[in-house]
Each structure stands twice: as C-alpha cells, then as structure tokens.
Amino acid sequence: MRILFTGGSGKAGREVVPYLLDRGHRVMNVDLVPLDDPRVDNITADLTDGAQVFNVMSMYADFDELEPGTGVPRFDAVVHFAAVPRILLKPDNETYRINVLSTYNVLEAATKLGIRKVVIASSETTYGVCFADGER
C-alpha cells in the first residue's frame, strides 16, 4: 500500500512509520523536518495551504512511478499525524488555526482525489492533560 503520512518525523510518527515500512508499505512523509530513514521519501509542505496539500497528495509517490506504463499515481491511504502537538508551543489561536486548517485540507484533498482510507491521530496533550495538576 502507498501511504502518505503527515507528521512522520514527530514523536508518534517516528514509531509508526517504521512499523508500516516493516510490513511492506511504501511511505511518503510530509513534514517540516525530514525523517532520517533511507526507506522513506520526504517532502516538505505547508499543510495549512490547501493547494500544497492537494499537490502533494496528487503527485507521484515514488520515482518508480515515473516509468512509462505504470498508470495513474495514487496514494492508497493517508495517515494524518501532523499538528502542533501541545499547548505552550505557539499562541493558542495559532495552534487552533494550524491544527484545524491542516486537518481540513488533508480531508478535503483526500475526498477530491478519491483516497478512501484516512487515519487521523491526535494527542492528549492538546487538552493539557499531561500538564494538569491533581488527579487525572
């Protein structure tokens, strides 16, 4: 399966991407920082820009697909982990803008491109649970 993975260089992504690769999937990582794994193709894109998201999701998944007769390229699935992972990294309104807009753009592009398998992950740190005082 050809998988477009957003946020594969983050804490969770660094665990999940090798898991997928070990099971024979081809992964393209879309992140601000490349994932240091020779088995992964990395591309940098601003996921808050709908045009960039659509372009990345509709491009070739690998150099092998440039060969004549290989058909129309298409990712089989999208795994969306990319996000501002916790509070206090950016102003709250900027965290909201980035996380909501990037998720919308990924879902919109996947829908328009006919990519039917989409996995979305979030983090409990979004709610500040890991930083809360008292019982949890």
Image (cartoon, grey):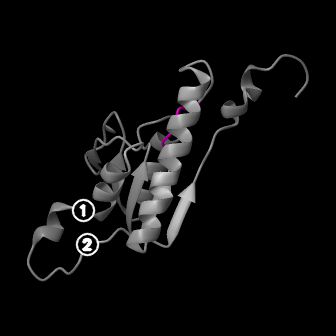
Q: Position of residue 91 (x, y in %)?
A: 57, 20
Along the polypeptide, which appears first: circle 2 or circle 1?
Answer: 1
- The quadrant in which the C terminus is found is top right
Do the residues under discs 2 and 1 have CB atoms within 8 angstroms? yes
Asked if one can make out residue 81 in the rendered structure from this viewpoint, the answer is: no
Relative vertical location of residue 5 with respect to residue 124 in this rendering, above or below:
below
Examine the residues drawn in magenta and state their main secondary structure.
loop
Q: Residue at x 59, y 49 (%)?
A: 121
From the image, tell me which residue sits under label 2: 73
Label 1 crowding class (10 Å Cα cut-off): few <14, some 14-19, many 20+? few
Asked if one can make out residue 65 in the rendered structure from this viewpoint, the answer is: yes
Q: Position of residue 126 (x, y in %)?
A: 66, 33
Boundaries of the magenta span: 81-85
Regarding mark 1 in the picture, which secondary structure is present there?
loop
37 or 30, nearer to the observer? 30
* Amino acid of disc 2: Pro
Does 117 appear in magenta?
no
From the image, tell me which residue sits under label 1: 59
